[in-house]
Protein backbone atom coordinates (compact mmCIF):
# COMPACT_ATOMS: atom_id res chain seq x y z
CA UNK A 1 0.00 0.00 0.00
CA UNK A 2 2.77 2.43 0.94
CA UNK A 3 4.59 1.73 -2.34
CA UNK A 4 1.47 2.45 -4.42
CA UNK A 5 0.86 5.65 -2.48
CA UNK A 6 4.37 6.93 -3.18
CA UNK A 7 4.14 6.01 -6.86
CA UNK A 8 0.88 7.95 -7.10
CA UNK A 9 2.48 10.99 -5.49
CA UNK A 10 5.40 10.90 -7.89
CA UNK A 11 3.13 10.54 -10.89
CA UNK A 12 1.17 13.60 -9.84
CA UNK A 13 4.31 15.56 -9.08
CA UNK A 14 5.79 14.81 -12.46
CA UNK A 15 2.67 16.07 -14.19
CA UNK A 16 2.80 19.45 -12.46
CA UNK A 17 5.26 21.81 -14.12
CA UNK A 18 6.22 24.80 -11.97
CA UNK A 19 4.15 27.92 -12.54
CA UNK A 20 5.19 31.48 -11.86
CA UNK A 21 5.87 32.08 -8.16
CA UNK A 22 3.00 33.45 -6.12
CA UNK A 23 3.20 37.15 -5.30
CA UNK A 24 2.21 39.00 -2.14
CA UNK A 25 2.39 42.78 -1.68
CA UNK A 26 5.50 43.67 0.30
CA UNK A 27 5.30 45.82 3.45
CA UNK A 28 5.60 49.55 2.83
CA UNK A 29 6.10 52.43 5.20
CA UNK A 30 6.83 52.49 8.90
CA UNK A 31 7.24 49.10 10.64
CA UNK A 32 4.82 48.55 13.51
CA UNK A 33 7.83 48.71 15.83
CA UNK A 34 11.49 49.39 15.06
CA UNK A 35 13.09 46.34 13.50
CA UNK A 36 9.81 44.55 12.75
CA UNK A 37 10.20 42.30 9.71
CA UNK A 38 7.80 40.10 7.81
CA UNK A 39 4.43 40.23 6.13
CA UNK A 40 1.94 42.57 7.78
CA UNK A 41 4.52 44.48 9.81
CA UNK A 42 3.54 47.75 8.15
CA UNK A 43 0.34 47.80 10.20
CA UNK A 44 -0.17 50.83 12.47
CA UNK A 45 -1.98 48.57 14.97
CA UNK A 46 -3.23 50.90 17.74
CA UNK A 47 -1.00 53.85 16.84
CA UNK A 48 -2.66 57.20 17.50
CA UNK A 49 -5.55 55.69 19.41
CA UNK A 50 -6.73 55.82 23.00
CA UNK A 51 -4.60 54.36 25.78
CA UNK A 52 -6.68 51.84 27.73
CA UNK A 53 -5.48 50.54 31.09
CA UNK A 54 -5.89 47.00 32.42
CA UNK A 55 -6.28 47.57 36.15
CA UNK A 56 -7.30 44.12 37.42
CA UNK A 57 -6.89 40.42 36.68
CA UNK A 58 -10.61 39.72 36.26
CA UNK A 59 -11.92 37.73 33.33
CA UNK A 60 -14.39 40.47 32.39
CA UNK A 61 -15.81 43.78 33.51
CA UNK A 62 -14.44 47.31 33.87
CA UNK A 63 -10.66 47.44 34.00
CA UNK A 64 -10.24 43.93 32.59
CA UNK A 65 -8.18 42.92 29.58
CA UNK A 66 -11.35 41.64 27.92
CA UNK A 67 -13.03 45.04 28.26
CA UNK A 68 -10.01 46.83 26.79
CA UNK A 69 -9.77 44.44 23.86
CA UNK A 70 -13.50 44.77 23.14
CA UNK A 71 -13.47 48.58 23.04
CA UNK A 72 -14.02 50.16 19.60
CA UNK A 73 -11.56 52.35 17.77
CA UNK A 74 -7.76 52.43 17.61
CA UNK A 75 -6.29 51.69 21.03
CA UNK A 76 -3.16 50.74 22.88
CA UNK A 77 -3.76 48.38 25.79
CA UNK A 78 -1.35 48.77 28.72
CA UNK A 79 -1.22 46.90 32.01
CA UNK A 80 -1.22 48.45 35.47
CA UNK A 81 -1.18 44.98 37.03
CA UNK A 82 0.90 41.85 36.68
CA UNK A 83 -0.11 38.27 37.38
CA UNK A 84 -2.41 35.57 36.02
CA UNK A 85 -5.74 36.11 34.28
CA UNK A 86 -7.93 33.00 34.36
CA UNK A 87 -10.07 33.28 31.24
CA UNK A 88 -13.49 31.63 31.24
CA UNK A 89 -13.70 31.71 27.46
CA UNK A 90 -11.50 32.70 24.56
CA UNK A 91 -10.40 36.33 24.63
CA UNK A 92 -11.86 37.54 21.33
CA UNK A 93 -10.28 40.45 19.47
CA UNK A 94 -13.01 41.64 17.12
CA UNK A 95 -12.40 45.39 16.91
CA UNK A 96 -9.43 46.30 14.65
CA UNK A 97 -6.44 48.60 15.18
CA UNK A 98 -5.19 47.45 18.55
CA UNK A 99 -1.82 47.06 20.26
CA UNK A 100 -1.71 44.75 23.27
CA UNK A 101 1.49 45.73 25.06
CA UNK A 102 2.35 43.01 27.55
CA UNK A 103 5.70 44.67 28.20
CA UNK A 104 3.92 47.31 30.29
CA UNK A 105 2.88 44.82 32.99
CA UNK A 106 4.74 45.27 36.28
CA UNK A 107 6.29 42.47 38.29
CA UNK A 108 6.68 39.20 36.42
CA UNK A 109 4.32 40.22 33.61
CA UNK A 110 1.01 38.71 32.53
CA UNK A 111 -0.11 35.12 31.97
CA UNK A 112 -3.42 34.03 30.42
CA UNK A 113 -4.65 30.57 31.43
CA UNK A 114 -7.66 28.23 30.98
CA UNK A 115 -8.44 29.67 27.52
CA UNK A 116 -6.62 31.40 24.70
CA UNK A 117 -6.80 34.46 22.46
CA UNK A 118 -8.71 34.57 19.17
CA UNK A 119 -8.07 37.40 16.70
CA UNK A 120 -10.97 37.86 14.29
CA UNK A 121 -9.92 41.17 12.76
CA UNK A 122 -7.12 43.19 11.21
CA UNK A 123 -4.29 45.49 12.23
CA UNK A 124 -3.32 43.86 15.49
CA UNK A 125 -0.02 43.77 17.39
CA UNK A 126 0.40 41.42 20.36
CA UNK A 127 3.69 41.53 22.25
CA UNK A 128 5.23 40.16 25.44
CA UNK A 129 2.33 38.01 26.65
CA UNK A 130 2.27 34.47 28.00
CA UNK A 131 -0.69 32.40 26.82
CA UNK A 132 -0.96 28.91 28.32
CA UNK A 133 -4.51 27.53 28.39
CA UNK A 134 -3.75 24.11 29.88
CA UNK A 135 -6.50 21.53 30.32
CA UNK A 136 -9.42 23.93 30.36
CA UNK A 137 -12.41 23.65 32.68
CA UNK A 138 -14.62 25.78 30.41
CA UNK A 139 -13.40 25.39 26.79
CA UNK A 140 -13.85 22.29 24.61
CA UNK A 141 -10.53 20.57 23.92
CA UNK A 142 -10.81 20.53 20.12
CA UNK A 143 -11.00 24.33 20.00
CA UNK A 144 -8.71 25.09 22.92
CA UNK A 145 -5.93 26.80 20.99
CA UNK A 146 -3.60 29.11 22.84
CA UNK A 147 -3.70 31.67 20.02
CA UNK A 148 -5.89 31.73 16.91
CA UNK A 149 -5.99 34.19 14.02
CA UNK A 150 -9.15 33.63 11.98
CA UNK A 151 -11.02 35.75 9.45
CA UNK A 152 -14.74 36.00 10.17
CA UNK A 153 -15.35 36.92 6.53
CA UNK A 154 -13.18 37.17 3.40
CA UNK A 155 -10.78 40.09 3.64
CA UNK A 156 -11.34 40.76 7.34
CA UNK A 157 -8.27 39.01 8.75
CA UNK A 158 -4.99 40.66 7.82
CA UNK A 159 -1.98 42.55 9.16
CA UNK A 160 -1.58 40.68 12.42
CA UNK A 161 1.82 40.64 14.13
CA UNK A 162 2.60 38.29 17.00
CA UNK A 163 5.97 39.11 18.52
CA UNK A 164 7.77 37.97 21.66
CA UNK A 165 4.97 35.85 23.08
CA UNK A 166 5.23 32.58 25.00
CA UNK A 167 2.58 30.15 23.87
CA UNK A 168 2.25 26.72 25.45
CA UNK A 169 -0.16 24.03 26.61
CA UNK A 170 -2.79 24.32 23.89
CA UNK A 171 -5.04 21.28 23.63
CA UNK A 172 -5.66 21.76 19.90
CA UNK A 173 -2.99 23.99 18.36
CA UNK A 174 -0.63 26.19 20.25
CA UNK A 175 -1.10 28.68 17.39
CA UNK A 176 -3.55 28.46 14.47
CA UNK A 177 -3.68 30.96 11.59
CA UNK A 178 -6.48 29.96 9.27
CA UNK A 179 -9.58 30.85 7.29
CA UNK A 180 -8.35 33.19 4.57
CA UNK A 181 -6.04 35.32 6.71
CA UNK A 182 -3.37 37.40 4.96
CA UNK A 183 -0.25 39.29 6.02
CA UNK A 184 0.69 37.66 9.30
CA UNK A 185 4.04 37.49 11.07
CA UNK A 186 4.94 35.33 14.06
CA UNK A 187 8.37 36.28 15.39
CA UNK A 188 10.70 35.82 18.35
CA UNK A 189 8.21 33.63 20.22
CA UNK A 190 8.37 30.40 22.19
CA UNK A 191 5.82 27.91 20.87
CA UNK A 192 6.18 24.89 23.06
CA UNK A 193 4.71 21.88 24.80
CA UNK A 194 1.48 21.47 22.90
CA UNK A 195 -0.44 18.98 25.02
CA UNK A 196 -0.42 15.52 23.48
CA UNK A 197 -2.73 12.99 25.13
CA UNK A 198 -5.00 15.44 26.91
CA UNK A 199 -8.69 15.67 25.92
CA UNK A 200 -8.51 16.04 22.11
CA UNK A 201 -10.88 13.83 20.12
CA UNK A 202 -8.05 12.76 17.79
CA UNK A 203 -6.02 11.38 20.65
CA UNK A 204 -2.40 12.49 20.39
CA UNK A 205 -2.43 16.12 19.31
CA UNK A 206 0.61 18.07 20.44
CA UNK A 207 0.74 20.75 17.73
CA UNK A 208 2.87 23.86 17.29
CA UNK A 209 1.73 26.30 14.58
CA UNK A 210 -0.79 25.76 11.78
CA UNK A 211 -1.21 27.91 8.67
CA UNK A 212 -4.24 26.55 6.85
CA UNK A 213 -7.31 26.98 4.71
CA UNK A 214 -6.50 29.72 2.19
CA UNK A 215 -4.06 31.61 4.38
CA UNK A 216 -1.22 33.40 2.59
CA UNK A 217 1.50 36.02 2.89
CA UNK A 218 2.86 34.72 6.19
CA UNK A 219 6.26 34.99 7.85
CA UNK A 220 7.49 32.71 10.63
CA UNK A 221 10.90 33.85 11.77
CA UNK A 222 13.23 33.50 14.74
CA UNK A 223 10.91 31.37 16.87
CA UNK A 224 11.64 28.47 19.19
CA UNK A 225 9.45 25.42 18.66
CA UNK A 226 10.02 22.88 21.44
CA UNK A 227 8.32 19.66 22.51
CA UNK A 228 5.52 19.75 19.91
CA UNK A 229 4.72 16.42 18.23
CA UNK A 230 4.01 18.07 14.87
CA UNK A 231 3.38 21.31 12.97
CA UNK A 232 6.57 23.23 13.61
CA UNK A 233 5.03 24.79 11.57
CA UNK A 234 2.46 23.20 9.22
CA UNK A 235 1.97 25.05 5.94
CA UNK A 236 -1.26 23.71 4.53
CA UNK A 237 -3.62 24.16 1.61
CA UNK A 238 -2.31 27.16 -0.34
CA UNK A 239 -0.55 30.51 -0.26
CA UNK A 240 2.93 32.01 -0.05
CA UNK A 241 4.88 31.44 3.16
CA UNK A 242 8.31 32.25 4.57
CA UNK A 243 9.86 30.11 7.32
CA UNK A 244 13.21 31.56 8.37
CA UNK A 245 15.73 31.02 11.19
CA UNK A 246 13.51 29.03 13.51
CA UNK A 247 14.86 26.53 16.02
CA UNK A 248 12.85 23.31 16.24
CA UNK A 249 13.64 20.97 19.14
CA UNK A 250 12.27 17.55 20.08
CA UNK A 251 9.38 17.00 17.70
CA UNK A 252 7.56 13.68 17.61
CA UNK A 253 6.28 12.67 14.17
CA UNK A 254 7.41 15.39 11.78
CA UNK A 255 9.02 18.74 12.42
CA UNK A 256 7.89 20.98 9.56
CA UNK A 257 4.93 19.76 7.49
CA UNK A 258 4.17 21.31 4.11
CA UNK A 259 1.45 20.28 1.71
CA UNK A 260 -1.53 21.09 -0.42
CA UNK A 261 -4.66 19.00 -0.74
CA UNK A 262 -6.50 21.34 -3.08
CA UNK A 263 -6.03 22.56 -6.63
CA UNK A 264 -4.51 25.78 -5.31
CA UNK A 265 -0.78 26.47 -5.21
CA UNK A 266 1.38 26.52 -2.12
CA UNK A 267 4.82 28.12 -2.38
CA UNK A 268 7.25 28.48 0.51
CA UNK A 269 10.76 29.36 1.54
CA UNK A 270 12.30 27.24 4.30
CA UNK A 271 15.63 28.90 5.00
CA UNK A 272 18.22 28.81 7.76
CA UNK A 273 16.21 26.75 10.22
CA UNK A 274 17.87 24.46 12.75
CA UNK A 275 16.28 21.12 13.65
CA UNK A 276 17.49 19.32 16.79
CA UNK A 277 15.95 15.91 17.56
CA UNK A 278 15.15 14.99 21.15
CA UNK A 279 13.86 12.12 23.24
CA UNK A 280 10.32 12.20 21.81
CA UNK A 281 11.21 11.54 18.16
CA UNK A 282 9.11 8.54 17.11
CA UNK A 283 11.06 7.56 13.97
CA UNK A 284 14.77 8.40 14.01
CA UNK A 285 15.00 8.28 10.21
CA UNK A 286 12.18 10.81 9.68
CA UNK A 287 13.12 13.84 7.61
CA UNK A 288 12.87 17.26 9.26
CA UNK A 289 10.72 18.64 6.42
CA UNK A 290 7.92 16.37 5.17
CA UNK A 291 6.04 17.51 2.07
CA UNK A 292 2.75 16.25 0.67
CA UNK A 293 0.96 16.90 -2.60
CA UNK A 294 -2.58 15.73 -3.17
CA UNK A 295 -2.81 14.09 0.24
CA UNK A 296 -4.50 15.64 3.27
CA UNK A 297 -1.87 17.82 4.96
CA UNK A 298 -4.09 18.73 7.89
CA UNK A 299 -3.97 15.14 9.13
CA UNK A 300 -0.24 15.48 9.72
CA UNK A 301 0.91 12.65 7.46
CA UNK A 302 0.32 9.82 9.90
CA UNK A 303 -0.62 7.25 7.26
CA UNK A 304 -1.16 6.89 3.49
CA UNK A 305 -4.66 7.84 2.33
CA UNK A 306 -6.58 7.84 -0.91
CA UNK A 307 -5.99 10.94 -2.98
CA UNK A 308 -9.31 12.73 -2.94
CA UNK A 309 -8.83 15.45 -5.52
CA UNK A 310 -6.49 17.14 -7.98
CA UNK A 311 -3.11 17.92 -6.54
CA UNK A 312 -2.26 21.54 -6.00
CA UNK A 313 1.08 22.90 -7.09
CA UNK A 314 3.79 22.70 -4.46
CA UNK A 315 6.92 24.81 -4.96
CA UNK A 316 9.59 25.00 -2.26
CA UNK A 317 12.85 26.84 -1.85
CA UNK A 318 15.09 25.22 0.75
CA UNK A 319 18.49 26.56 1.79
CA UNK A 320 20.94 26.35 4.70
CA UNK A 321 18.73 24.26 6.98
CA UNK A 322 20.50 22.17 9.61
CA UNK A 323 19.12 18.86 10.84
CA UNK A 324 18.63 15.16 10.09
CA UNK A 325 19.54 14.13 6.53
CA UNK A 326 21.01 17.56 5.71
CA UNK A 327 23.84 17.31 3.20
CA UNK A 328 26.40 19.87 2.13
CA UNK A 329 25.73 20.85 -1.46
CA UNK A 330 22.14 19.55 -1.54
CA UNK A 331 19.73 21.91 0.23
CA UNK A 332 16.78 19.62 -0.53
CA UNK A 333 18.29 16.57 1.18
CA UNK A 334 16.58 17.53 4.43
CA UNK A 335 13.11 17.06 2.91
CA UNK A 336 11.05 14.06 1.84
CA UNK A 337 7.88 13.65 -0.20
CA UNK A 338 5.56 11.79 2.13
CA UNK A 339 7.02 9.25 4.51
CA UNK A 340 10.15 7.39 3.64
CA UNK A 341 13.22 8.24 1.62
CA UNK A 342 11.48 9.83 -1.37
CA UNK A 343 13.10 13.07 -2.46
CA UNK A 344 11.29 16.09 -3.82
CA UNK A 345 11.04 15.97 -7.61
CA UNK A 346 12.48 18.76 -9.72
CA UNK A 347 9.05 20.28 -10.32
CA UNK A 348 8.75 21.08 -6.62
CA UNK A 349 12.18 22.67 -6.27
CA UNK A 350 12.53 26.43 -6.66
CA UNK A 351 15.95 27.48 -7.93
CA UNK A 352 15.82 30.90 -6.26
CA UNK A 353 14.42 32.24 -3.02
CA UNK A 354 10.80 33.23 -3.51
CA UNK A 355 10.01 36.90 -3.11
CA UNK A 356 8.64 37.50 0.36
CA UNK A 357 8.79 40.30 2.91
CA UNK A 358 12.44 40.96 3.79
CA UNK A 359 13.75 39.19 6.89
CA UNK A 360 17.29 39.50 8.18
CA UNK A 361 18.62 35.96 7.74
CA UNK A 362 21.54 34.40 9.58
CA UNK A 363 23.28 31.09 9.05
CA UNK A 364 21.25 28.09 10.14
CA UNK A 365 24.24 26.78 12.09
CA UNK A 366 24.21 29.91 14.28
CA UNK A 367 20.53 29.83 15.22
CA UNK A 368 20.89 27.72 18.37
CA UNK A 369 23.26 30.24 19.93
CA UNK A 370 21.73 33.51 18.79
CA UNK A 371 18.02 32.76 19.03
CA UNK A 372 17.79 31.59 22.63
CA UNK A 373 18.96 34.95 23.95
CA UNK A 374 16.01 36.82 22.45
CA UNK A 375 12.88 34.70 22.26
CA UNK A 376 9.69 34.46 24.29
CA UNK A 377 7.62 36.95 26.27
CA UNK A 378 10.33 38.23 28.60
CA UNK A 379 13.79 37.06 27.50
CA UNK A 380 15.62 39.07 30.18
CA UNK A 381 13.50 37.71 33.05
CA UNK A 382 11.89 34.48 31.98
CA UNK A 383 9.41 32.69 34.20
CA UNK A 384 9.92 29.09 35.30
CA UNK A 385 8.22 27.58 32.24
CA UNK A 386 10.22 29.46 29.62
CA UNK A 387 13.43 28.99 31.59
CA UNK A 388 12.89 25.24 31.71
CA UNK A 389 12.07 24.99 27.99
CA UNK A 390 15.15 26.98 26.99
CA UNK A 391 17.29 24.90 29.34
CA UNK A 392 15.87 21.74 27.73
CA UNK A 393 17.10 22.94 24.36
CA UNK A 394 20.54 23.77 25.70
CA UNK A 395 20.89 20.50 27.61
CA UNK A 396 19.10 18.09 25.28
CA UNK A 397 16.49 17.26 27.92
CA UNK A 398 12.70 17.23 28.24
CA UNK A 399 9.92 15.53 26.31
CA UNK A 400 6.44 16.01 24.89
CA UNK A 401 3.87 16.24 27.70
CA UNK A 402 0.20 15.40 28.21
CA UNK A 403 -0.53 17.76 31.09
CA UNK A 404 1.00 20.93 32.56
CA UNK A 405 1.12 19.15 35.90
CA UNK A 406 3.93 16.95 34.57
CA UNK A 407 6.20 20.00 34.54
CA UNK A 408 4.98 21.91 37.58
CA UNK A 409 1.82 23.58 36.26
CA UNK A 410 1.23 27.29 35.88
CA UNK A 411 3.82 29.31 37.81
CA UNK A 412 2.94 32.04 40.28
CA UNK A 413 3.84 35.49 38.99
CA UNK A 414 4.80 38.39 41.23
CA UNK A 415 2.33 41.27 40.68
CA UNK A 416 4.80 44.09 41.13
CA UNK A 417 3.69 47.71 41.28
CA UNK A 418 3.02 49.99 38.34
CA UNK A 419 4.95 53.25 38.13
CA UNK A 420 2.98 56.43 38.87
CA UNK A 421 1.14 57.75 35.80
CA UNK A 422 -1.00 60.67 36.89
CA UNK A 423 -2.53 61.43 33.50
CA UNK A 424 -3.11 57.75 32.60
CA UNK A 425 -1.56 58.09 29.17
CA UNK A 426 0.55 54.93 29.33
CA UNK A 427 3.76 56.82 30.11
CA UNK A 428 5.05 57.04 33.71
CA UNK A 429 5.39 60.52 35.14
CA UNK A 430 9.14 60.18 35.61
CA UNK A 431 9.62 59.12 32.00
CA UNK A 432 7.60 62.10 30.76
CA UNK A 433 9.54 64.47 32.99
CA UNK A 434 12.84 63.13 31.67
CA UNK A 435 11.73 63.73 28.08
CA UNK A 436 10.21 67.13 28.72
CA UNK A 437 6.64 65.94 28.18
CA UNK A 438 3.63 67.04 30.21
CA UNK A 439 2.94 64.49 32.94
CA UNK A 440 -0.36 66.23 33.69
CA UNK A 441 -1.80 65.93 30.18
CA UNK A 442 -2.67 62.74 28.31
CA UNK A 443 -2.78 64.54 24.98
CA UNK A 444 0.96 64.22 24.35
CA UNK A 445 0.77 60.41 24.24
CA UNK A 446 -0.18 60.52 20.56
CA UNK A 447 2.27 63.28 19.66
CA UNK A 448 5.52 62.45 17.86
CA UNK A 449 8.04 64.76 19.45
CA UNK A 450 11.09 63.36 17.65
CA UNK A 451 9.38 63.14 14.26
CA UNK A 452 10.26 59.51 13.56
CA UNK A 453 6.69 58.39 12.93
CA UNK A 454 6.19 56.67 16.28
CA UNK A 455 4.03 58.37 18.90
CA UNK A 456 5.45 59.25 22.29
CA UNK A 457 3.66 56.39 24.03
CA UNK A 458 4.99 53.97 21.42
CA UNK A 459 8.50 55.19 22.15
CA UNK A 460 7.94 54.23 25.78
CA UNK A 461 6.67 50.79 24.76
CA UNK A 462 9.76 50.30 22.61
CA UNK A 463 12.01 51.17 25.54
CA UNK A 464 10.29 48.55 27.69
CA UNK A 465 10.63 45.94 24.95
CA UNK A 466 14.34 46.67 24.66
CA UNK A 467 14.77 46.25 28.42
CA UNK A 468 13.11 42.83 28.21
CA UNK A 469 15.51 41.76 25.48
CA UNK A 470 13.02 42.28 22.69
CA UNK A 471 14.32 45.16 20.68
Image (cartoon, grey):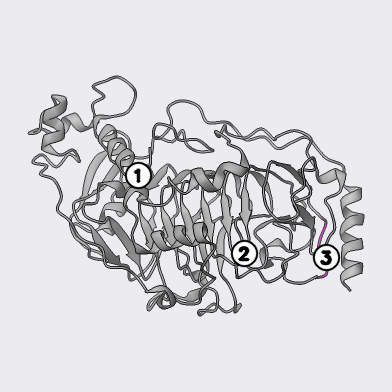
Per the rendering, the mark at residue 230 is 2
Residue beneath the point at 53% across and 60% down: 226
Task: Give whichever of discs 1 and 2 has the lower sequence position.
Answer: 1
Residue beneath the point at 47% across and 49% down: 372
Per the image, label 1 sits on a secondary structure element best described as: strand
Per the rendering, the mark at residue 307 is 3
Q: Quadrant of the C terminus?
A: top left
Write the start and end of the magenta stretch as one range. Answer: 305-310
Q: How many residues crowd mark 2 within 10 Å: few (<14), some (14–19), many (20+)? A: many
Horizontal side of 51 relative to 278 (left or right) equals: left
Which of 20/234 is in front?
A: 234
Residue at mark 1 to residue at mark 3: CA–CA distance: 42 Å
Horizontal side of 439 relative to 283 (left or right) equals: left
Q: Does residue 309 belong to the magenta stretch?
A: yes
Residue 413 appears at what percent x and percent y?
Answer: 25, 63
Residue 409 appears at what percent x and percent y?
Answer: 37, 73
Q: Residue 158, can we see it?
A: no
Q: How many residues crowd mark 3 within 10 Å: few (<14), some (14–19), many (20+)? A: some
Per the image, label 3 sits on a secondary structure element best described as: loop
Q: Does residue 439 belong to the magenta stretch?
A: no
Residue at mark 2 to residue at mark 3: CA–CA distance: 22 Å
Q: Quadrant of the N terminus?
A: bottom right
Residue beneath the point at 28% across and 36% down: 463
Task: Give whichever of discs 1 and 3 has the lower sequence position.
Answer: 1
Residue 240 appears at what percent x and percent y?
Answer: 66, 43
Amino acid sequence: MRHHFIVALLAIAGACAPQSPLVCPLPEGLPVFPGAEGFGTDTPAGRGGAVLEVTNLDDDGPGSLRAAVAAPGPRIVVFRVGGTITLQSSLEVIEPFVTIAGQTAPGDGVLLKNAGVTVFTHDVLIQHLRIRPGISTTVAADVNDALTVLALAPGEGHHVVIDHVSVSWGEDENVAVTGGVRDVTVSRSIIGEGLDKARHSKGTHSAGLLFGYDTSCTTTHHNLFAHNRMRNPLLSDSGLHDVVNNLVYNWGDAATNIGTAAADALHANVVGNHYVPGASLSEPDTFAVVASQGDDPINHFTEPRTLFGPAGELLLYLADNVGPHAEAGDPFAIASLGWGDVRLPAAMRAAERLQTAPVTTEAGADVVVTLLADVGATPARRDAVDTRIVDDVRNGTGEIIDSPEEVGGHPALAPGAALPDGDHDGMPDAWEDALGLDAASAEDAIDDDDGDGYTNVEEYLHSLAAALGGG
